[in-house]
Image: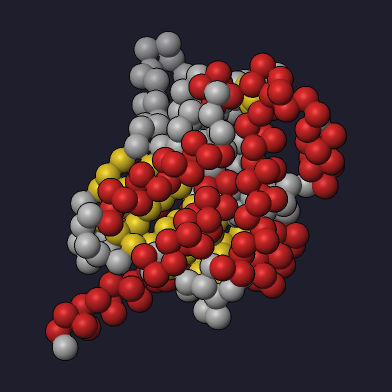
Amino acid sequence: MQKSDDDPLPPRPDTSEFLLPGSGLSALLIHGLSGTPYEMRYLGERLAAAGVRVLGVRLQGHARAPEDLGASSHSNWYESVVDGFERLRQFGDPNVVVGLSMGAILAARLAADQREAVAGLVMLAPAFFLPAKTRLALRLMRPARAWGNRVYFSNGDGASSDIHDDDARSIHPGTRLMPLGAALDLVELSDRMRPRLGEVVQPTLLIHSRRDHTCPFERNVDFVMRHLGSADKRTVALEESYHVIAVDSEKHRVAEETLEFVAQFRTTVRARANA
């Protein structure tokens, strides 16, 4: 059926930061590079429906103009994560951290830095390694770092996110341009965090798709599982989704696996309270 000019346009995705009420457990949700809190909202709503308090943080420079992203750095992004974490700590409940792509690297850094203040960690499609050709190209561009905030890569119409589901991809908030500086900052953040994975000792759930074109499955999963310091770690492999798994074809499974994983921390708190 042909769409009429009188048909209403679909609502624009909400890209703002969100705080959803809950008790007994708090979850900090961290989106990826050039992403927005929207890509974590479905998961956040599922967690909140189960009674978990949720903060979907907006990283500095994101959900704004490309120039704003170009003017920020991985240090700024981590400051946003720490600020969000401190907001949740005020509630006095255990805290879990869930990050997607670059957000997973920031989540791992927070777990390493905060130690026992982070009860558990969920890494969704972590971006420790990009495809080999992309990594090589970015490393060759490192001498241009001084001009990184004035050089941009085109993303075409901004709807080229690595998402399998057509409907999800069509409404996903994209960015027209990717600053070279932001891409180089991702590489630097990954380089700095890889040697520190052994410091992450919290129970960890890793969810990654075998069809991820942005962060290759085997390279990232093998590295994380070999170097993570946690004795309690598990991988869930998705078969259909691409990279942005929190909104893609298997987002329901991502939510279910995350809910099952974080439930252990609420159960422990309640058991202690009743002891």
Q: In front here: 10 or 33?
A: 33
| Picture residue at 28% right of the left edge, 72% below the top | 266
Instruction: Please identify the residue farthest to the left as the structure is shown.
Output: 274
Q: Residue at x 53, y 56 (%)?
A: 109
Judge whether 262 appears above or below 34 on screen. below
Q: On the picture, is 64 further left or further right than 20?
A: right
Question: Does residue 45 appear to the left or right of 103 in the view shown?
Answer: left
- Asked if residue 131 lies left or right of residue 202, the reply is right
Kindly identify the residue that appears in the image at 60 percent across and 21 percent down.
176
Image height check: is 212 above or below 255?
above
Image coordinates of residue 108 in percent, x first then y, are 53, 58
Q: How many marks?
A: 0
Residue 158 location (% of width, % of height):
60, 24
**Quick one: 162 or 128, which is closer to the camera?**
128
Residue 56 seen in the figure: no
Residue 105 visible in the shown view: yes
Indicate how the structure is coloured in the image.
Answer: secondary structure
The answer to which image quadrant residue 151 occupies is: top right
Q: Position of residue 78 (x, y in %)?
A: 48, 44
Q: Residue at x 45, y 37 (%)?
A: 59
Residue at the extreme bottom: 275
Quadrant of the rendered image containing residue 275: bottom left
Horizontal side, residue 91 vs residue 223: left or right: left
